[in-house]
Each structure stands twice: as structure tokens, then as C-alpha cells.
Amino acid sequence: MTSSSSLGSTRIILEFNFDRDINGAARDVQAAINAAQSLLPGGMPSRPTYRKANPSDAPIMILTLTSESWSQGKLYDFASTPTGANHRAN
């Protein structure tokens, strides 16, 4: 578990073992949030929420293309063509 706080916000990250059922973990997290609700400040603008995230869903590479001569559409088409195709910048 790791956490970080700033004015008006706190983020808590929970990591589970690979053999842990993620839906069961989500139910446990929601139950813990519900149980802690009465301990939280009354003036909170919204209730605490959670979301499930799988780190293996994150991209392994992010690529940015820019050009002084190609339009945004041409760059998009270039980037969308499968790797290994004959790419040649004009």
C-alpha cells in the first residue's frame, strides 16, 4: 500500500498478489470504504471511490510524432500503418 496526499485529495494505491481474485479484492476495498465512512470528515465534497487497474494493460512504449511538413492526418495514417510496412518520409 502506498499513499499520497495534497490539499483536498488523497490517493491510496493497493497492490495485490497475482493469485488474488481482482473482483474479490474490489469487493473487499468497497467494504473497507463503507466501514470507514463514519470516520471520514463530514464536509467531504464526494464519497471515496476506487477503480481497478491492471498494470499489464499499460502500454510498453509511447511514441510521439511531429512534423513541420506533414499534416496531423498524414502523421496519424503513418503511425496507424502496421510496423514492418514500407514507411518512407517524403
Image: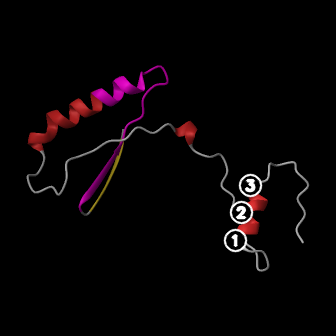
Q: Amino acid at mark 3?
A: Ser
Quadrant including the N terminus: top left
Magenta residues, start to end:
8-27
Q: Are marks 2 and 1 in contact (CB under 8 Å)?
A: yes
- For disc 3, the marked residue is 80
Between marks 1 and 3, how big is the CA–CA gap?
Answer: 12 Å
Disc 1 packing (10 Å; few <14; some 14–19; many ≥20): few
Residue 56 — which label? none
Between marks 2 and 1, how big is the CA–CA gap?
Answer: 6 Å
SS assignment at label 2:
helix
Q: Are marks 2 and 3 in contact (CB under 8 Å)?
A: yes
Residue 72 — which label? 1
Res 38 → quadrant: top left
- For disc 2, the marked residue is 76
Looking at the image, is 74 positioned above or below residue 87? Answer: below
Query: Is 31 covered by the magenta stretch?
Result: no
The residue sitting at 49% across, 24% down in the picture is 18
* x and y, in percent, of residue 16 in the image: 42, 29
Disc 3 packing (10 Å; few <14; some 14–19; many ≥20): few
Q: Amino acid at mark 2?
A: Tyr
